[in-house]
Amino acid sequence: DQALPMEVFLFVIGYLVQFGASCLLLYKIYKFKSIYGLSVDTQISYLLAVISRCVWSMETRLVETKFAYLELTCSTAACGGLAFLCWQLYHTTSKHSVPFLRVYVTAPACLVLAFFFHPGDDWFSMQILVSYTMFQEAMGLLPQLYLMRHMHEVEAMTSHYVGLIVIARFIRMIFWGKMYFLGEHFLQLFFADICHTLLSADYMYLWMRKLKDGGRLIYSQSA
C-alpha cells in the first residue's frame, strides 16, 4: 500500500477526533438517558453535514484510501445515532438556541452560501456540497455554545465533547494550510473554519484552564 498523503491524513485525523467526541457524547446520553444541556440543532447540523460528505467524498482523492472509508462510515453511524437519541429523548430538554441559530435557519442559509462561495468556476458542481458541509459544520456548533452560555455550569463530558470538536476544526485548518502550499486554494472553506475557531476561542481558553487546574467550567457570562 502507498503511504497516506499528509493532506489526506490531516483531513481524516480531524474527523476521527470529531468521531471520538461523538462517541463520548453517545456514552453520556446512554448513561444519563437525557440530552439536557445539549443542542439538538447541533446534532442535526452535523448529521446533515456528514450526509453531504458521503456524497462528495466519492469524487475526491479520499476514495484512494480505505482509512477514509472507515472514518466516514464510523462518523455517519455516530451522527445518525446521536440524532436518533436526540429524537428519542427530546422530552428531556426544553432549552434551545435562539431562532436564527436553529438548524431550520442555518441549513438553508449554508446552502445558499455554498452556492455562491465554493471552489471552482462552475455554477453547479459537487464543490457546492463540499462548501455546504464546511459551512454547516461551522454554524453547527453555535447553538451548543449558545446553550452553554446560558447554563450556570457546563457538565464535564459535554465540555470535553465541545473541546474535541474545536480541536478537530483546528486540525482541519492545518489541512487547509497544507493544501494552500500544494497550490490548491480553498480560501472560502478555510475562512469558515477560522470563524468557527475564533467564535469558540474563549470557550477553549476556559476548557484548557479546567484541564490544567481542575474545578468547574463556568461559561455563562451571568454566572
Image (tube, grey):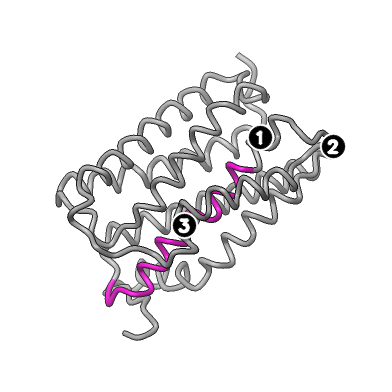
As measured in the structure, the alpha-carbon distance from the residue carrying label 2 to the one carrying label 1 is 27 Å
Taking depth in this image into account, of 195 and 146 the one nearest to the observer is: 146
Instruction: Provide residue 176's location: percent of width, then percent of height.
Output: 70, 46
Q: In what element is the residue under mark 2?
A: loop
Taking depth in this image into account, of 166 and 196 the one nearest to the observer is: 196
Q: In what element is the residue under mark 1?
A: helix
Q: For marks 2 and 1, give the one nearer the viewer.
A: 2
Above or below — where is 72 with respect to 152? Answer: above
Question: Which residue position is annotated with label 3?
Answer: 141
Instruction: Provide residue 218's location: percent of width, then percent of height.
Output: 33, 77
- Tell me what residue is drawn at x 53 percent, y 56 percent: 139
Question: Which residue position is annotated with label 1?
Answer: 6
* On-image quarter of the N terminus: top right
As measured in the structure, the alpha-carbon distance from the residue carrying label 2 to the one carrying label 3 is 29 Å
Taking depth in this image into account, of 19 and 145 the one nearest to the observer is: 145
Instruction: Provide residue 4's location: percent of width, then percent of height.
Output: 62, 26
- Tell me what residue is drawn at x 62 percent, y 62 percent: 195
Q: Main secondary structure of the magenta part?
A: helix
